[in-house]
Amino acid sequence: MSASAASPSANPAPLGLMGFGMTTVLLNIHNAGFFPISSMILAMGAFYGGIAQIIAGLMEYKKGNTFAFTAFTSYGSFWLVLVGLILAPRFGLADKTPEAFMGWFLVMWGVFTLFLFIGTLRKNRALQVVFGSLVVLFALLAARDFTGSELIGHIAGYEGIFCGCSAIYLAMAEVLNETYGREVMPIGAMG
């Protein structure tokens, strides 16, 4: 029996995972040193990384999924805040946040993500990879901002590309596995 036959509502997780994954890949192509921050990254961050994830989170709330509600609405908010942190100084609305203080911002998100990673230990392996690699990404980005190291920033970029791709994989696995009513793309046994 497919998930859609068991539930009258669609699974919002692929939307949230794609919003997170695609936006994370694009931002980390920048972090890896290939392109500067541009309107494309900011628009993806605000609309797909931000708003789409919040919508997915609210849909998960209606389904009673506390984990997904918390994750999607929080990371959707993260993307909106990040875009605000980049744009506010450009429009003269606030001073640019010092790099070391941005490091603390990333540490806080890393701690939050670590707790969510612990929650994934009761879920599938693919989700564990997404959250585990996101913990590492936040740690690397915080280290970059604390040290000013361009090398750590580039390493973070490559790791972030991996993290985003793992979320894209899980999103498409959920869509295709539901569509075909069987495991077409493996996501690993439940923890």
Image (tube, rainbow, N blue to C red):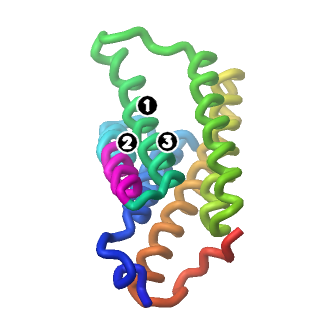
Identify the residue shown where x is 59% and y is 34%.
109
- Badge 2: residue crowd in 10 Å (few <14, some 14–19, many ≥20): many
The reply to whether the C-beta atoms of the residues labelled 2 and 1 are less than 8 Å apart is yes
Q: CA distance from mark 2 to mark 3?
A: 13 Å
Q: CA distance from mark 2 to mark 1?
A: 8 Å
Residue type at mark 2? Gly
Identify the residue shown where x is 41% and y is 9%.
95
Q: Nearer the viewer, mark 1 or mark 3?
A: 1
Q: Earlier in the sequence, mark 2 or mark 1?
A: 2
Q: Earlier in the sequence, mark 1 or mark 3?
A: 3
Q: Which residues are magenta?
A: 50-62
Residue bearing mark 1: 82
User: Element type at marker 3?
Assistant: helix
The reply to whether the C-beta atoms of the residues labelled 1 and 3 are less than 8 Å apart is no
Residue bearing mark 3: 30
Tell me: 150 left or right of 167.
Answer: right
**Residue 115 screen position, x and y as percent:** 67, 43
Residue bearing mark 2: 45
**Dominant secondary structure of the residues highlighted in magenta in the image:** helix
Question: Up-down: is 186 above or below 31?
Answer: below
Residue 53 falls inside the magenta stretch:
yes
Residue 37 falls inside the magenta stretch:
no
Q: Earlier in the sequence, mark 2 or mark 3?
A: 3
Residue type at mark 3? His
